[in-house]
Amino acid sequence: MARLPQDQRYSGVAIAFHWIIALLAIVNLAVGLLHDAIPALGALMPGHKAIGITVLALTAGRLAWRLAHRAPPLPAHTPAWEKGLAHATHWTLYALLLLMPLSGWAMVSGTEKRRPLDWFGTFDIPYLPVSTATGGAAHEAHELLGWLMLALVVLHVVAALRHHLILRDNILARMAPVLRR
Ligand code: HEM
Ligand code: HEM
């Protein structure tokens, strides 16, 4: 079938931001949640921190782009509750894409014994000027918000698959670089 018209799909920039950030955030969720149970993953934690800072920078760019460009409207027949749930999920995910890196950064900054913090060995990332009390609260937030993010990502993926496989509409196709419907 034909490719969707431009005004009914996300732009190439929005699609690139979506999938690069989704991949990085899913890797970080997995490494973060599993590193206690699988001690070997501890070696990946410097990468977890560098990936998280990358997500923060990319999300700042993505949000600036998003606020300047409209998303394609949802199909007119979408029930109001579903539109509301989709918008709430998307904007909460944007908030979490900022809050997860910021809380992680604050956690590793506000601790008694700081570990080296660098971006894949290329340059040092400065520590945030926070107290150990703030660092402790940020640690709690990082864990709690991590579970919230996992739940919302699962909901989001189930919703995308429901649209594609059951409702058979264009919702997944319009965020996909190649998929057609
Ligand atoms: C997309 C961004 C990020 C996501 C989705 C994420 C997710 C997670 C999750 C789910 C955990 C497990 C929480 C726990 O059980 O305590 C975790 C742990 C951790 N994260 Fe992140 N994180 C991100 C960014 C960062 C950043 C930017 C830093 C630091 C610069 C960081 C540092 C840490 C550390 C040190 C731990 C281990 C905490 C512990 O062992 O108690 N994270 N992360
Ligand atoms: C950590 C992973 C992910 C995050 C943080 C995330 C975040 C987001 C956000 C914030 C939007 C809203 C875009 C906007 O209108 O501004 C969005 C849209 C979308 N995402 Fe994700 N996403 C993730 C993973 C996925 C995955 C794995 C799929 C597919 C299975 C997916 C499918 C979609 C689709 C189809 C849309 C467009 C919805 C629409 O047209 O209204 N996402 N995503």
Image (cartoon, rainbow, N blue to C red):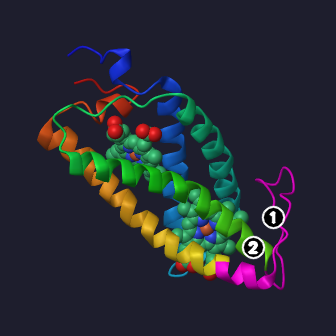
Per the rendering, the mark at residue 46 is none
Identity of the residue furthest to the left in this view: 166
Instruction: Answer yes or no: disc 2 within 8 Å of ligand 1.
Output: yes
Residue 18 in view of the camera: yes
Identity of the residue drawn at 83% across and 86% down? 112
The answer to whether mark 1 and mark 2 are in CB contact below 8 A is yes
Tell me the number on the disc at residue 108.
2
> Considering only vertical position in the picture, is 109 above or below 94?
below
Secondary structure found at label 1: loop
From the viewer's perspective, tell me whether residue 178 is left or right of residue 29: left
For marks 1 and 2 on the same chain, the one whose residue lies earlier in the sequence: 2
User: Label 1 amino acid?
Assistant: Leu
Q: Residue at x 50, y 32 (%)?
A: 14
Instruction: Find the magenta span and give its range.
Output: 111-137
Q: Amino acid at mark 2?
A: Val
The local crowd at label 2, few if under 14, some if 14 to 19, many if 20 or more residues have their Cα within 10 Å, is: many
Residue 13's place in the image compared with 43, above or below, is: above
- Label 1 belongs to which residue? 117
Q: Is residue 127 magenta?
A: yes
**Residue 46, image x, y percentages:** 71, 64
Check disc 2 and report its element: helix, strand or loop. Answer: helix
Instruction: Look at the image and tell me whether residue 43 can be seen.
Output: no
Position of 79 compared to 44: left or right?
A: left
The image shows a total of numbered marks equal to 2
Task: Check mark 1 vs ligand 1: CB closer than 8 Å? yes or no.
Answer: yes
Figure check: 83 above or below 101: above
The residue that appears at 50% across and 69% down in the rendered structure is: 146
